[in-house]
Image: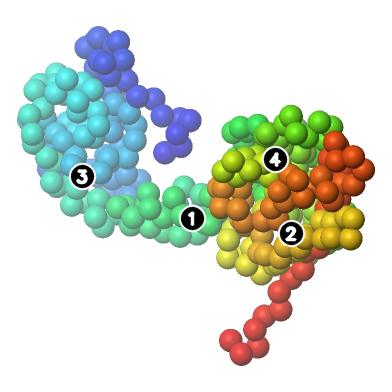
Amino acid sequence: MESDSLECVSLADGLDEEDIAQHVSSKPHAGGAAFPGVSPATSVHELLECPVCANSMYPPIHQCCNGHTLCSTCKSKVHNRCPTCRQELGDIRCLALEKVAESLQLPCKYSNLGCSEIILYYSKIKHEAQCNFRPYNCPYAGSECLVVGDTPSLVAHLRDDHKVDMHTGCTFNHRYVKSNPREVENATWMLTVFYCFGQYFCLHFEAFQLGMAPVYMAFLRFMGDENEARNFSYSLEVGGNGRKQIWEGTPRSIRDSHRKVRDSHDGLIIHRNMALFFSGGDRKELKLRVTGRIWKEQPNSDS
């Protein structure tokens, strides 16, 4: 179930026994080794829902002597007392329900986003953690944004809520400026989003400490999964005063957080002294011009 719809109650949360009993009695729930009148998969799925936290139950599934079940996490929360009948739980496992779950098949919870997989119950959590249709986290790096969604909704969110720069085209020429750069150890510049080849790409630029050395880093992320990102490559170039530095690589998927990409050093890294040399003048102000392009890799004919 979705995390924002979970309702977990327990005596440890300050509820008395009457509150717990009232909570579970309002939920349709059966237990024991026999499940009379249950035939559809949805009904079996309801049996596998913990009456306390509403999460799906996985082995060990506990039951009281009257057959009422609950998950192992909630067993400790209710002080080893059945939340339905208040009998002591002991260490009885509902092996029948665990066995029924083995053959149960359910749709992925991201079916509304396009996933058509039907998964065995005990494989559902693993599949959903890796499902290609699961929503992406917002790629904005300037704050810890909690918005999630598919690519079109995140593009609209970046444009309308974060006011990022949006560009169409596969080449770019950006200028990053910072006064008193020697006084700034960590900084993040505004994200830029590019649309080309029918896809969206995010260009990041920031300052941070690499060990003891202050550096600037530029890198590109792809708004899609890693297997799609491998279809593209990009180059970044920075220079000045007769010198230049070039980087070529594959854009990282936004499945990888901006911090993970930065900490892996997978991008164009410019040490601050070199960046100020490229900036020219008295080297007291950062005036760095980063150019680049994105291209689509041609399929290997041999494969």
The residue sitting at 49% across, 55% down in the picture is 131
Numbered circle sitting on residue 22 = none
> Label 4 to label 1, Cα distance in Å?
33 Å
Could you tell me the amino acid type at mark 4? Answer: Ala
Residue at image coords 87%, 46%: 279
Where is residue 253? Give x, y as percent. 61, 55
| Dot 2 amino acid type | Gln
Kindly report the distance in space between the C-alpha atoms of the residues bearing marks 3 and 1. 23 Å
What number is the disc on residue 207? 4
- Give yes or no for contact between labels 2 and 4 (Cβ–Cβ under 8 Å): no
User: Which of the pair 112/125 is nearer the observer?
Assistant: 125
| Residue type highlighted by circle 3 | Pro
Residue hosting label 3? 59
Q: Nearer the viewer, residue 90 or 264?
A: 264
- Quarter in which the N terminus is drawn: top left
**In this view, the mark in front (2 or 1):** 2
Label located before the other in sequence (3 or 1) = 3
User: In the image, what residue occupies the spot 45% across and 30% down?
Assistant: 5
Q: Eyeballing the image, is 144 above or below 205? A: above
On screen, residue 95 versus residue 219, left or right, reads: left
Could you tell me if residue 83 is visible in this image? no
Residue 215 x %, y %: 68, 45
Q: Secondary structure at mark 2?
A: strand
Q: Earlier in the sequence, mark 2 or mark 1?
A: 1
Q: Position of residue 202 (x, y in %)?
A: 72, 50
Distance (Cα) linking label 3 and label 4: 48 Å
Image disc number at residue 199: 2
- Res 63 → quadrant: top left
